[in-house]
């Protein structure tokens, strides 16, 4: 019996948690392409052997303290607003999950340190590290690493390393460096969980623009974060055991960057990095797509603009005019985007800046006013009948840029890759994810259909938000991507 079969049979099961929290996830990376675009692949980058700048915080938890620390104030507050008195139920769920691992972990550590008593704890460190922005600048970014360790300083070998590229956020404190959200639960499998904030989040919120338009740079930021996290682990006597391996996880907006990291690992990563990590498998859920193809889908379906318009423009400012085919980011939006001012933290920003540097909370009131793409994009990106012109020079420049920095073609995966997507997702069509699957398909690549929870009534919640949350929790609770292949329905 799988761990989820256990939880489906209990009152506080996974489906109940999904129902309570599903509308809390904010999503998505929006992008696409026209068939004749043939971009140049950016030059390979060299991974530094040392990227750590500083440790900015550390926490030591007993199992019960760890369960209590999961989540964030804004997260739990939103839960309460949706379902009063739900927080104790969620805390009970977390604590039950933690306790389900204790016997195995006690035995593992007793064998390692020769002690009969519980002499281990969960340690979590936030840190800064050197990496590169989408426009090529070297800056400091932030991240988190969480692992189990002996209390007395004796060395410990973890079973696995888990790399996590996060989804889009509703609140700044959902960033890994700010809170313990779901994925640190994977530490209970005796896995070191490494999570970059990525460009814009953590220490760079309000300073750096959203880098989600370049999966290549997000993959680099993950790799640089991993090097820094490994150094912190070594400082505290924690290494990957001889038979250990690494798994790579991403969902929704983090799905394409996790795939790009897998491609880079297979095709360009230095041997010393491969020898250290020993990547075994990659999982991406509810977000695997070809960026330009998906953007083109949006252009053909303006009825989806209401929840998504901000992410349709949030990536422009991360790129230079040279990367954008000679156009400035401001040239892609209508004038009212530049004239509309929003005050954030006592300072005025125009709407384009706000969408780029901050969370959807600040721009939320404007999303309700969006009814057509001519309110989102520059007038010279449309046909005479008001449709987005895929042949307009500016439109083609944008799609070409997205293709160049998100191109997963030409990759023959050398390790297991699992793609999961829900057929009922109306924000990212199943066909888009399946098309990417066919693009990279070989004997190592597998695709799964994620069922929409029957407990959620049709039309009651956005399917993408529901399933993205569901996948996020699944990732946190299983040990390997292959475990999900036993839960979701395989497709061809």
Image: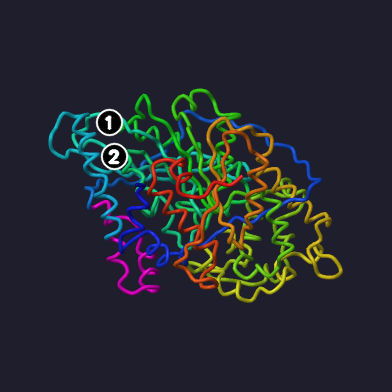
Image: 295 above or below 195: below
Would you identify the image quadrant in which residue 334 lies?
A: bottom right
In this view, the residue in front, 394 or 109, is 109
In-front residue for pair 317/14: 14
Image spot of residue 333 (x, y percent):
71, 64
Give the magenta-colored segment's residue range. 65-91
| Rendered view: 476 above or below 281 | below
Where does residue 266 sit, x and y in percent of width and height? 57, 30
Residue indicated by mark 1:
156
Residue 85 among magenta residues? yes
Residue wearing tag 2: 148
Left or right: 63, with 395 as reference point: left
- Residue 151 located left or right of residue 134: left
Q: How many marks?
A: 2
The residue drawn where x is 22% and y is 32% is 153
Image quarter where the C terminus lies is: top right
Q: Residue at x 63, y 45 (%)?
A: 135
Mark 1 element type = strand
Q: Residues within 10 Å of mark 1 (few under 14, many from 20)?
A: many
- Determine whether, in the image, residue 288 is placed left or right of residue 379: left
**Does 164 appear above or below 72?**
above
Residue 24 point in image, percent of width and height: 45, 65
User: Which badge, 1 or 2, is on the more N-terminal residue?
Assistant: 2
> Is there CB contact under 8 Å for labels 1 and 2?
yes
Please provide percent x and percent y for residue 315: 63, 55
């Amino acid at each position: 019996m799988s761990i989820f079969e256990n939880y489906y049979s209990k009152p506080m099961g996974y489906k109940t948690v999904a129902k309570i929290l599903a509308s809390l996830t904010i999503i998505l990376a929006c992008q696409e392409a026209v068939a004749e675009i043939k971009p140049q692949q950016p030059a390979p980058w060299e991974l530094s052997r040392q990227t750590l700048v500083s440790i900015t915080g550390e926490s030591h938890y007993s199992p019960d303290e760890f369960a209590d620390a999961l989540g964030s104030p804004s997260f739990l507050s939103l839960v309460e607003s949706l379902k009063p008195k739900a927080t104790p139920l969620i805390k009970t769920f977390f604590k039950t999950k933690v306790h389900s691992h204790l016997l195995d972990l006690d035995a593992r550590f007793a064998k390692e340190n020769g002690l009969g008593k519980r002499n281990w704890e969960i340690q979590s460190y936030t840190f800064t590290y050197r990496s590169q922005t989408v426009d090529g600048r070297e800056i400091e970014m932030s991240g988190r690493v969480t692992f189990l360790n002996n209390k007395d300083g004796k060395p410990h070998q973890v079973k696995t390393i888990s790399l996590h590229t996060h989804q889009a956020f509703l609140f700044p404190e959902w960033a890994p460096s700010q809170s313990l959200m779901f994925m640190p639960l994977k530490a209970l499998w005796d896995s070191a969980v490494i999570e970059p904030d990525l460009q814009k989040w953590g220490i760079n919120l309000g300073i750096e623009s959203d880098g989600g338009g370049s999966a290549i740079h997000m993959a680099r930021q993950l790799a640089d974060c991993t090097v820094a996290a490994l150094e912190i682990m070594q400082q505290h006597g924690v290494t990957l055991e001889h038979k250990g391996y690494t798994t790579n996880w991403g969902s929704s907006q983090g799905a394409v960057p996790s795939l790009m990291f897998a491609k880079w690992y297979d095709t360009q990563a230095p041997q010393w990095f491969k020898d250290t990590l020993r990547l075994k498998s990659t999982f991406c859920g509810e977000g695997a797509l070809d960026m330009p193809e998906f953007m083109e889908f949006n252009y053909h379906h303006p009825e989806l603009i209401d929840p998504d318009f901000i992410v349709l423009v949030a990536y422009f400012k991360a790129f230079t005019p040279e990367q954008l085919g000679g156009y400035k980011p401001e040239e892609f939006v209508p004038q009212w985007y530049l004239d509309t001012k929003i005050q954030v933290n006592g300072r005025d920003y125009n709407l384009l800046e706000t969408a780029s540097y901050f969370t959807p909370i600040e721009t939320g009131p404007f999303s309700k006013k969006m009814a057509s793409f001519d309110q989102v994009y520059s007038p010279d990106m449309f046909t005479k009948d008001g449709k987005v012109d895929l042949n307009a020079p500016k439109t083609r420049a944008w799609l070409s840029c997205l293709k160049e920095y998100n191109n997963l073609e030409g990759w023959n995966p050398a390790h297991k890759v699992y793609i999961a997507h829900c057929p009922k997702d109306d924000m990212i069509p199943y066909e888009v994810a399946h098309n990417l699957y066919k693009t990279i398909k070989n004997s190592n690549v597998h695709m799964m259909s994620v069922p929409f929870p029957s407990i959620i009534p049709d039309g009651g919640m956005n399917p993408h938000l529901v399933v993205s949350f569901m996948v996020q929790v699944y990732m946190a609770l299983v040990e390997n991507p292959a475990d999900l292949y036993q839960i979701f329905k395989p497709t061809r």
